[in-house]
Amino acid sequence: MKVLELKVPPLLVVLLVGAAMWVVSHYALRLDVPEPFRILGALTLAFAGGGIALSGTRAFRQAKTTVNPLAPEKSSALVRTGIYGMTRNPMYLGMLLVLAGWSVFLASGPAFLGLPGFVLYMGRFQIAPEECILERLFGTDYLDYKRKVRRWL
């Protein structure tokens, strides 16, 4: 399955998983959650996710390194400060939180299965290949960073 490694833009993965969650939600029983709570929960998660993802993007831009997830070999700096001191993948964590908000809005138990699906896909086909490249580029600095900061949270 190496053919999928670093080939599908993560934003497209989010859209595909979100669409699958929506389809599944139409064929499953909805959870009995009042609409105001669903909307508030969904917006809270989505805004938190958007803020985390934007914080990661901003840190990359400030370090003048690539934000292109399909070309990690173009990385020119190892960013370890700010949000990157808490998570190695704030952009993907942000996307996960947006999907979590979507699942809360859909209020469908089976739709929540999109979340672990997203994590598994991203871990195997996006993050693991990125980490191999970053280890080659930054050596022991990256290995030290990996030991200190978790992949997601």
Image: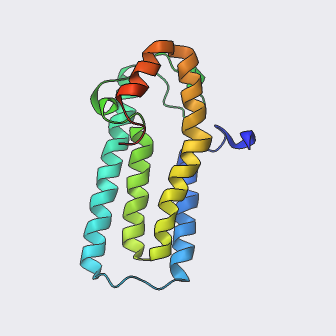
- Give 20 or 29, whichever is nearer the viewer: 29
Image quarter hosting the N terminus:
top right
In the figure, residue 38 lies in which quadrant?
bottom left
Residue 125 drawn above or below residue 130: below
Q: Is residue 14 visible?
A: no
Identify the residue shown where x is 44% and y is 77%.
108
Relative placement, left or right, of 78 versus 139 is left
Residue 112 drawn above or below residue 135: below
Residue 139 drawn above or below residue 54: above
Identify the residue shown where x is 59% and y is 23%.
133
Q: Can residue 85 be seen in this view?
A: yes
Image quarter hosting the C terminus:
top left
Identify the residue shown where x is 55% and y is 75%.
24
Q: Residue furthest front?
A: 147
Identify the residue shown where x is 30% and y is 63%.
43
- Give 148 or 67, whichever is nearer the viewer: 148
Relative placement, left or right, of 11 versus 97 is right
